[in-house]
Image: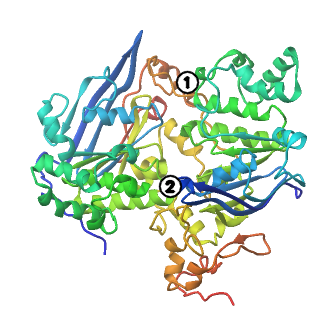
Amino acid sequence: MSEPVLEVRNLVKYYPLAGGPFGTGTGIVHAVDGVSFRLDHGTTMAVVGESGSGKTTMAKVILLLERPTSGSIRFQGEEITDAHGALLREYKRSVQAVFQDPYSSLSPRMRVRDIVGEPLQVHERLGRAALRTRVGELLEQVGLNPAAASAYPHQFSGGQRQRIAIARALSLNPKLIVLDEPVSALDVSIRAQILNLLVDLQRDRALSYLLISHDLAIVEHMSHSVGVMYAGQLVELAPAERLYAEPQHPYTEALLAAVPSIDPDLPLGQIVGGDVANPADPPSGCRFHPRCPLRAELGNPEICSEEDPAAQVDAASHNVACHFRGAAAKSRAQAASPPA
Amino acid sequence: MTPQLRALEPTAEAGGNVLLRVTDLYTQIPIRGGVVKAVDGVSFDVRRGEIVGLVGESGSGKTMTCLSIIRLLPVAAARTVSGEVWFNGTELLGASDKVMRDVRGRHIAMVMQDALTALNPVLTVGEQVSEPLRHHFGWSRTEARERVLEVLRAVRIPRPAERLDEYPHQFSGGMRQRIVAAMGLGPSPELMLADEPTTALDVTIQAQFLTLVKDLQAQTQMSVLWITHDLGVVAQTCDSVNVMYAGRIVESGSVRRILKQPLHPYTRALLESVPAIGAKRQKLYQIAGQPPDLANLPPGCPFYDRCPLRMEICREQFPPATPDRDGGRVHCWAVGGK
């Protein structure tokens, strides 16, 4: 359990903004700005954040669909940041992805057989008969009838299409699957089917998942560890139970407080004002400082707007990037003092 | 501290406590070889000063119900084939176009899901918020200005006097949705139809919007019909709820009763299948199968194929309403029989 399947260090991805005189650019979008984490074999790590926080860019970089600006990605101990040739091929085989929208991620002109079988044709050059058998097996594993192989995507509902996408991702026996909002486009009554399927597959095939989501309830249900992303940075990273039981970063607290509970007797918690930070023009210091209720409570200490807080780790591998770490979790009535 | 929004006229008490009464509404879309029964016999009330939820999954008919009420059906072929919609003493389905033009915007406002498409990109925010005031009250730009500022302040747009002349793209997503709400609130409508207004927003921005609408509703005493698929949003905003499935309301009642003691097997399954923070479940309850094809509905209960409590009678007849303890109702043979 403790061997990392994926280890990411100081991952950075910047995009130049177009425009400006002579196309010199008008600035830089800090999409991912110094993200580090490790994902243990057979577990699920989730990255939660709001739109524009950089979570999908991070997923793209990890899938090597985009090369990072700097930083390192190690897969099963091997550096793959600049991988090419055979190593890249092997990596792309071991790491698969399932995307949000099964209406646009499946080619409408391919039969299910070809969608699911394509990776096998490319990587394993299976013969027709062998391919047919494998595709049938894969469809069964995701709860579809093998007869579905000859149909086209439009003949299926959203939930079934997502099953087809999962079958395709499983075809090469990957070690790691990146799940980018895998149930967001699905109806409420269908989501549970897909989430349960993903949990079963993980158990049966010792898969590791990197789950990208904005839904804190789904993340709690699925994950072993959780990273909270804000404006390109992980502000808190901890084992799932710790994060939900004792959130320490004020942004994590704000996110949890904002999720509407299905119990009408549990009202929304303290609501933070302001808007999500703009990654093209991130605030100085701690990127959450303009919205931070804790900073306001402490009388707007200067350090928050001047210095970028480095992540601090405690014994239970609970990482928090906040100058006043833990103060958020303590009694709100007491004025906290800055760490020595 | 909180900016107050005054109602332009005190809400009339005439017409009793019920502001909107929808009775036996049927809306259908003819297609080749049949009809899609988008709304299939829907009845519910919205009382004055009440926030009423209409929950359901995509295709359950919640948006079509809402659009049938103000007669803005999106598909040319769609027809409301029968039913009555009484709003403040006027029947809307048989009303003239002139009456409807007065009702829309002045008495019934709409807030849609996607603020970016609801706003005109080439008009300033000030022009768009003042438009319903100029149209319905014949006010000039200058006359409308004070009210526009009041409404923008009420929806918490910072420095409204300066930002009046800016365009929608200069505002963030959360602010745009609040501007759309301000457009609706200007003329002090008695009823606001909110169709998934927070679905496109981030959680922290959604929380801001939910509290804002609740505050404004309390200040102006308007009624809100809130359409959503999110049971958490319902729990945090609505007083009562109608649960829709395949074009019908299968259960309705107070929010507390529905979410804490759901009676209909669909409502129960829906609540159990949603992961909730703090409720670590080993496995989520999963509802088998999928919603039925609206062009080919079975004669009985539309949930029959997926229902754990189904009986023979369910296949043949849609169950009648069984009242619950506090004014709600449920349509289920298995529950009604008890």
Q: Nearer the viewer, residue B175 or A239?
A: B175
Image height check: is B330 above or below A255?
Answer: above
Taking the image as shown, residue B338 lies to the left or right of residue B124, namely: right
Residue located 72% across and 28% down the image: A143
Host chain of mark 1:
B
Residue B212 falls in which quadrant of the image?
A: bottom left
**Residue A190 screen position, x and y as percent:** 59, 36
**Residue B293 screen position, x and y as percent:** 49, 21
Host chain of mark 2:
B
Dot 1 and dot 2 residues touching (CB under 8 Å) = no
What residue is shown with label 2?
B202
Structural distance between the alpha carbons of marks 1 and 2: 35 Å
Q: Nearer the viewer, residue B156 or B116?
A: B116
**Of marks 1 and 2, the one in the foreground:** 2
Q: Tell me which amino acid carries mark 1.
A: Asp
Taking the image as shown, residue B80 lies to the left or right of residue A141, namely: left
**Residue A215 screen position, x and y as percent:** 58, 52
Instruction: Describe the element under mark 1 as helix, strand or loop.
Output: helix
What residue is shown with label 1?
B305
Let me know if residue B49 appears in the view.
Answer: no
Q: Tell me which amino acid carries mark 2.
A: Asp
Instruction: Describe the element under mark 2 as helix, strand or loop.
Output: loop
